[in-house]
Image: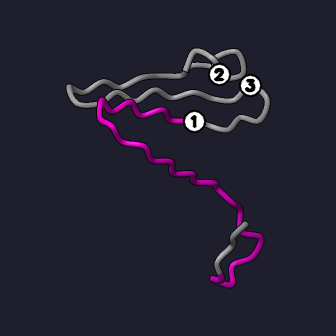
């Protein structure tokens, strides 16, 4: 994660015997990034984007 540290501020970390989680925040947009380091040959990406509903109709608000 050293390459992104110029654009992101390190916020916190959490360590367990089987994984580590590091939390960063973008200096430009405020977006939060969680880096989960698992020592396995596993490649996976999940992206969650918070969106704001502009009404209370109950309809899904998606990008």
Please report contact status of discs 2 and 1: CB closer than 8 Å, yes or no: yes
In whole angstroms, how far apart are the C-alphas of marks 2 and 1?
A: 11 Å
Q: Nearer the viewer, mark 2 or mark 1?
A: 2
Q: Residue at x 38, y 30 (%)?
A: 37
Q: Residue at x 43, y 43 (%)?
A: 43
Q: Which mark is residue 48?
A: none
Q: Residues within 10 Å of mark 3 (few under 14, many from 20)?
A: few
Return the residue nearer the eye: 34 or 60.
34
Please report contact status of discs 3 and 1: CB closer than 8 Å, yes or no: no
Q: Secondary structure at mark 1?
A: strand
Q: Secondary structure at mark 2?
A: helix
Q: Secondary structure at mark 3?
A: loop
Range shown magenta: 33-59
Q: Which badge, 2 or 1, comes first in the chain's sequence?
A: 2
- Residue furthest front in the image: 41
Q: Residue at x 77, y 35 (%)?
A: 29
Task: Indicate left or right for 36 with 30 as reference.
Answer: left
Q: Is residue 49 above or below residue 27?
A: below
Q: Is residue 53 magenta?
A: yes
Task: Indicate left or right for 40 with 62 as reference.
Answer: left
Q: Residue at x 45, y 47 (%)?
A: 44
Q: Which mark is residue 27?
A: 3
Residue marked by disc 2: 4
Horizontal and vertical percent for residue 32?
61, 36
Dividing the image into 4 quarters, which one contains the C terminus? bottom right
Q: Nearer the viewer, mark 3 or mark 2?
A: 2
Residue marked by disc 1: 33
Horizontal and vertical percent for residue 15?
30, 24
């Amino acid at each position: 994660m050293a390459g992104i540290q110029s654009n992101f501020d390190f916020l916190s970390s959490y360590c367990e015997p089987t994984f580590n989680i590091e939390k960063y925040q973008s200096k430009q947009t405020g977006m939060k990034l969680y880096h989960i380091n698992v020592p396995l040959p596993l490649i996976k990406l999940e992206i969650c984007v918070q969106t704001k509903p502009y009404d209370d109709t109950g309809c899904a608000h998606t990008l």
